[in-house]
Image (tube, grey):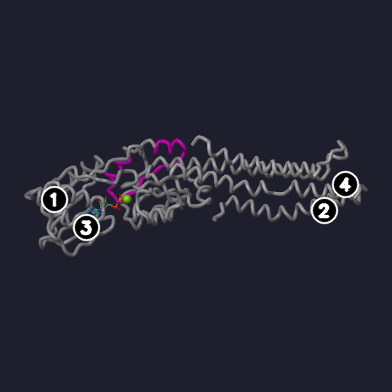
Amino acid sequence: GSKAPIQRLADRVAGIFVPAVIAAAVAAFAVWFFLAGQSFQFSMLIFISVLIISCPCALGLATPTAIMVGTGRGARMGILIRSGEALENAFRLTTIVFDKTGTLTNGRPEVTDVIPADGVEEKELLRLAASAERDSEHPIAKAVVEKAKNMGLKLSDKIEFKAEPGLGVSAKVDGREVLVGNLKFMRRKSVRFESLENELESLSSEGKTPVLVAADGKPLGVIAVADTLKDNARGVVSRLRKMGLEVAILTGDSLKTAEAIAKQAGIGRVIAEVLPGEKSAEIKRLQERGEKVAMVGDGINDAPALAQADIGIAIGTGTDIAMEAAEITLMRGDLEGVPLAIELSRKTVATIRQNLFWAFGYNTLGIPIAAGVLYPVFHFTLSPVIAAAAMAFSSVSVVTNSLRLRKKAL
Ligand code: ADP
Ligand code: MG
């Protein structure tokens, strides 16, 4: 039910076109009948031919048929496009921003290292962290809890649980004030992790996310969590760059970790340590620099950024709210859909332009012939019958051109 912007152009043109055509037909009649002294029948046929040939149905079909074929083609590939506007605007994009966790990576992190601080037992570190993280829905929390369970640890009950988006969680376990989160979180709570700085540094540079654990204001240790890059992430990024697009990664994770993941994926631009609430502001900042931005994300955190972006692309395996906020949803959760959707948009817009060119061109050429400009020299007029056939032919050619989109290589 929505109209693509280029369709509005066609509508505007049609608004001028219709009165102009009626005026042209009347003028043609008047010239032949009053000035050239032709019969009423001859002049009337000219009048009718002009009206028939200029019927702008090809013009009206040019955009919607291409959009319909384009969105249909997308749907078959698992790319759901919300509106004609989205399909048409996707070709203007300059920058594609990927969320990290769950979008570029599989979103199922696993614990890789457990590094206790001096005098702390490994099991105690994990047990306290897992007890605090027990009910958190964050993928990192799930990894920690899973690891503790695999080691057969008995988790304690916790009270006063509090999750801080993009930072971590705090809770009271066995009467101790437990904090689990990133460095930013620990800084806010003024827990100093200097003794483990080297470990943090080296874990991050391997692309792992260090999860810092503290109790009663003292560091207990670090649990490293690593998520794997999706198989085709690198290929998708390189294809997007070949298409002339800038690619960036946007994450709440630490800069070091994000840089390591970005390097694995072949992404040069990193926007890290962004709190969930600030993701949309980062998108806005890019837009203010004149970039047309697509945001690709999957989580609840990403919804405002998806809505802020020129085109929001939701991974269909993610949350419902992400899909609700996005213009394009990739049902198969496959990143391959990002370059495909943009390519599809480019091809659709090219088809619309061809259609409009032919539709306009046809009318511009047809009207003078129907008005009888060839008659004085060649004694040729367009009979209304031929005009009607040509009219139908022009519509068929526009529809056929749109249908070619179904088979175009993407
Ligand atoms: P992303 O931008 O990758 O989706 P989030 O905004 O969800 O990440 O989280 C950013 C960072 O905040 C994580 O990398 C982690 O360091 C920290 N964090 C958030 N929630 C938790 C949690 N429940 N447990 C531990 N760390 C957390
Ligand atoms: Mg995420």
Q: Between 240 and 157, which is closer to the camera in this rendering?
A: 157
Task: Name the mark nearer the viewer: 3 or 1.
Answer: 3
Circle 3: is it few (<14), some (14-19), or many (20+) Cα within 10 Å?
A: some
Residue indicated by mark 4 = 42
Task: Name the mark nearer the viewer: 4 or 2.
Answer: 4
Q: How many marks?
A: 4
Q: Mark 1–mark 4 contact, CB under 8 Å?
A: no
Q: Between 398 and 170, which is closer to the camera in this rendering?
A: 398
Circle 4: is it few (<14), some (14-19), or many (20+) Cα within 10 Å?
A: some
Secondary structure category for the residue under label 4: helix
Q: Is mark 4 within 8 Å of ligand 2?
A: no
Task: Name the mark nearer the viewer: 1 or 4.
Answer: 4
- In percent of width and height, residue 250 lies at 35, 48
Residue indicated by mark 2 = 26
Amino acid carrying mark 2 in the image: Val
Amino acid carrying mark 4 in the image: Phe
- Identify the disc placed on residue 135: 3
- In percent of width and height, residue 11 lies at 64, 54
Q: Mark 4–mark 3 contact, CB under 8 Å?
A: no
